Amino acid sequence: MVLVLLGALQAIAFFWTRLDQRRFPWGYPESRRPTLVGTWVGTLVTGGGARRGLLVEIRLVPVLITSRRGKVRVRGGREAKLEGEVRLCAAPGHVQGFTANGDTQDDRAASRVVLSLYPAEDVQEPGLAPSHLRGTWGGGDALDFEVDLYLRQGSAAISSTDDPDTGRPARAETKRADEATFRALCASLGR
């Protein structure tokens, strides 16, 4: 009986995954089409000229989701399709981490992406921090972002239209890259 149940779950997972691959080919490297998922690295530049290294890792939320109670369900259409991590650095050894979730605004091409960010640790150092990323992707190896920033001071999140760093979105041009590229970028910012 257990083997039959496991076999049925595998068949369901296979079916939904194949359907998902057709609907969102940009989320599956095995689709042999350009993918939005992956690691993107570049330099974020604020309106005030501050430069930060940026790493954005994007994954497609699994098509089958297991709840804390062990129930399995299919990812719904209204739920976030994207998850990942974001890291921001101003100098070597000074990296802020964030978890991300979000969605595409056009599921077929994934040309517009919105990610909401949450600090990865309970305690964050004071300074500039991102809250949202809005990306545009043309289907290649470049992903450009507008990034909403705020100034973290203790538990306060401060932004002002008069502040060049938080008053308007920062810009970041990213390319497909890896962790080593991000570390090298952070090291170059410390010089």
Image: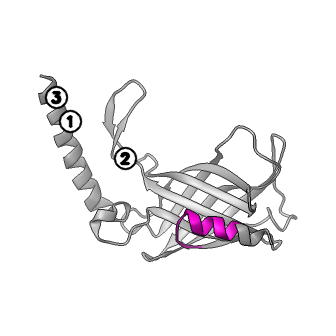
Which residue is denoted by mark 1 in the rendering?
A: 9
- Which x, y percent locates residue 115? 56, 56
Which residue is denoted by mark 2 in the rendering?
A: 62
Q: Is residue 108 left or right of residue 113?
A: left
- Which x, y percent locates residue 70? 35, 26
- Which x, y percent locates residue 52? 73, 66
Can residue 45 be seen in this snapshot?
no
Spatial CA span between label 3 and label 2 = 20 Å
Residue bounds of the magenta highlight: 174-186
Q: Quick one: quadrant of the N terminus?
A: top left
Task: Label 2: state its secondary structure.
Answer: loop
Q: Are marks 3 and 1 in contact (CB under 8 Å)?
A: yes
Can residue 188 be seen in this snapshot?
yes
Instruction: Identify which residue, 81 or 154, lies in the foreground.
Output: 154
Q: Is residue 120 magenta?
A: no
Provide the major secondary structure of the magenta segment.
helix
Amino acid marked by disc 1 = Leu
Residue for point 70% across, 66% down: 186
Which residue is denoted by mark 3 in the rendering?
A: 5
Spatial CA span between label 3 and label 1 = 6 Å
Instruction: Specify the label residue 88 is tagged with.
Output: none
Q: Is residue 177 above or below residue 121?
A: below
Q: Quadrant of residue 191?
A: bottom right
Ranked by sequence position, the earlier of labels 1 and 2 is 1
Task: Label 3: state its secondary structure.
Answer: helix
Graded by Cα atoms within 10 Å as few (under 14), some (14 to 19) or many (20 or more), the crowding at tag 3 reads few
Spatial CA span between label 1 and label 2 = 14 Å
Task: Label 1: state its secondary structure.
Answer: helix
Q: Quadrant of residue 147?
A: bottom right
Residue for point 12% across, 29% down: 4
Instruction: Identify which residue, 138 or 56, lies in the foreground.
Output: 56
